Image (cartoon, helix red, strand yellow):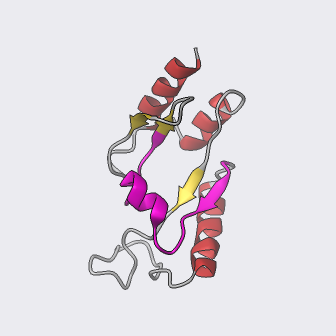
Amino acid sequence: MSLQSAFETHREKADFIWVYISEAHAIDDRRPSKTVKIREHTTLEERTAVAKNAAEALDLEIPLLIDDMENSIAEAYDAHPDRLFVLDAEGKIAYAGGRGPWGVDVAEMSETLTGLLK
């Protein structure tokens, strides 16, 4: 199951937000990616442009938010490099996926969401 298909399945009953955080393996980082050719963002404008390009490349229709340059959201949720979360009606974390990309399990996240929506 893809993240887009989970969004399409649950969008009528749940709010989805995709938060773009700092680049995990920027080419100018101490552990650069061999495939991603993105420099570490130095301005919010740069981060926003990269996030929009990523959303387009991934063909995601999920509403997009951009983390600030202090990485407040990433820090608050220990979300680096990739994580999936489901928050319940009270705003508590009902599901926290493993660190991505290998720990990201969209089907498991979707099952948790389905259980909450019953």
x and y percent of residue 77 in the render? Answer: 40, 52
Which residue lies at the image location 66% right of the left edge and 61% below the top edge? Answer: 56
- Give yes or no for residue 63 being in the magenta stretch: yes
x and y percent of residue 27 in the render? Answer: 38, 82
Q: Height in image: 48 above or below 63?
A: below
x and y percent of residue 85 in the render? Answer: 46, 41
For the C terminus, which image quadrant?
top right
Quarter of the rendering containing residue 13: top right
Q: Is 76 placed left or right of 6 in the picture?
A: left
Q: Which residue range is magenta in the image? A: 62-85
Counting labels gives 0
Q: Nearer the viewer, residue 72 or 12?
A: 72
Residue ranking furthest to the top = 118
Mark yes or no: residue 82 visible. Answer: no
Q: Height in image: 23 above or below 87?
A: below
Q: Nearer the viewer, residue 5 or 79?
A: 79
Q: Is 33 placed left or right of 107 in the picture?
A: left
x and y percent of residue 41 in the render? Answer: 50, 80
Residue ranking furthest to the left = 30
Quarter of the rendering containing residue 26: bottom left
Q: Height in image: 68 above or below 29?
A: above
Mark yes or no: residue 33 visible. Answer: yes
Residue ranking furthest to the front = 90
Q: Is 5 placed left or right of 116 in the picture?
A: right
Q: Nearer the viewer, residue 100 or 86?
A: 86
Q: Is 92 placed left or right of 17 in the picture?
A: left
Which residue lies at the image location 69% right of the left edge and 49% below the top edge? Answer: 61
Q: Nearer the viewer, residue 14 or 54?
A: 14
Which residue lies at the image location 64% right of the left edge and 29% below the top edge? Answer: 9
Q: Height in image: 86 above or below 80?
A: above
- Give yes or no for residue 43 being in the magenta stretch: no
